[in-house]
Amino acid sequence: MKSINKSILLFIMALAVVSSFTSCKKDDLPNNGTPRILYVRVTNPASSDSLLIGAAQGNLIAIIGENLGEARSMWFNNQPATLNPTYITNTSIIVNVPTPIPTVITNKLKIFFSNGDSLMHNFQVQISKPTVTSMTSEYVNTGEVATINGNFFYAPLTVKFTGGATAEVVSVTDKILQVRVPTGAQTGPVTVTTNFGETKSDFWFRDNRNIFISSDPYEGWWNESYVVKPADVKPGDPPSINGNYIRVKKTLGAWSWNEIAGGAANAMPNHSKNIPDAAILKPEDYNLKFEVNTLKPYNASTVRINVALKAEDNDAYQWKPPVDTKGQWNTIVIPFEEVVASYKVKPTLSSTGYWTRILMQGPGELDADISFDNFRLVPKVSK
């Protein structure tokens, strides 16, 4: 930031030196003293030939012209810019394009001067189409509110789920969009559309790809007693979001050994082969995801995760506290290359399936009430 400010100040000083040689007499001023914009460019002096006819919201630009020193306000479309007198000379104005979205599009900037004059110039504010980065939980029941995270969520907008069902928009800010999941919403990407473009998510709503632990059906060596079936859910319990889920509700002593789910490949015939070969060959292209719900904070012990191995690794990837979802389901996203980097023996391809395990063991006593579902390996980018 200091280097950027230094470049800007040097740029202004150079312009000021040039302008200081200009006579104060109106007849001697360029264009007879009438303000004029010659061009707009980027602020980096090394890129002085990079002229602009438009710029994105928030971008820093240099307006180059004549007799600009008495500028007092500036508007892009119908949004005001913030002018800093330090960055105004007779030959230049350095300013950020306003970030708020214009409600009237003129594709012009307008400068007002101290004597009441004004100056118009063609300039397009390049408004971004929405970006869709994540859902707070990728599993939300029909009729419940889903939270979509991203940017440039400019009303009016529509949200469509795979299958074509359109969601009711509950609330919207630039970066957080809440919608009610409609009847007919299917597994797959979510599409957000505004007046400035359309974006389809890389994540999938109710992502059912490559699930290796879900308890639907229960498989493995350990602790079927942790499995909660939808019919067993009581008021105050975490709701079922995809059939059965795993709930650990007990006190875990410091460094106590608690195998929660999983087992050898032959003990999990329906799930152990769900690891895609591509994730083994290029782990950097995949994310480990799962849903978690804490009715009490996860603030001690450690969740150790084995996935895509041929035998257990007791020092496997460690998902450490603190985490507190306050009784809501959240989707956890971990780059799979981070998981692989934690293994002593790196994964290799297997045609007979893989060892998987969720183990809780670590420092501190944990008064646990934590639930899990839908452990999966999915592509980071939809193709």
Image: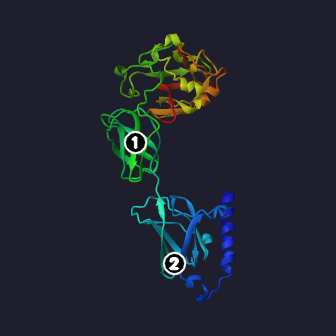
Q: Position of residue 89 (x, y in %)?
A: 61, 75
Q: Quarter of the image containing the N terminus?
A: bottom right
Q: Judge the density around disc 1: few (<14), some (14-19), many (≥20) Cα neighbours within 10 Å.
A: some
Q: Tell me the amino acid under the disc marked 1.
A: Thr
Taking the image as shown, residue 56 lies to the left or right of residue 30, namely: left
**Please, what secondary structure does the residue beneath circle 1 have?**
strand
Nearer-N-terminus badge (1/2) = 2
Answer whether residue 156 is visible to the viewer in this image: yes
Count of numbered circles on the image: 2
Question: In this view of the protein, which residue sits in the foreground, 182 or 247?
Answer: 182
Residue drawn at x 54%, y 79% is 35
Q: Residue 142 occupies which quadrant of the picture?
A: top left
Answer whether residue 320 is visible to the viewer in this image: no
Q: Position of residue 282 (x, y in %)?
A: 58, 29
Question: In this view of the protein, which residue sits in the foreground, 33 or 132?
Answer: 33
Taking the image as shown, residue 208 lies to the left or right of residue 23, namely: left
Question: In this view of the protein, which residue sits in the foreground, 254 or 107?
Answer: 107
Residue drawn at x 60%, y 27% is 339
Residue drawn at x 43%, y 27% is 208
Give the vertical position of 49 relative to 332 (above or below). below
Q: Position of residue 86 (x, y in %)?
A: 62, 71
Residue occupied by mark 1 = 191
Taking the image as shown, residue 359 lies to the left or right of residue 239, namely: right
Q: Tell me the amino acid under the disc marked 2.
A: Phe
Give the vertical position of 169 relative to 301 (above or below). below
Residue 113, label in figure: 2
**Please, what secondary structure does the residue beneath circle 2 have?**
strand
**Structural distance between the alpha carbons of marks 1 and 2:** 45 Å
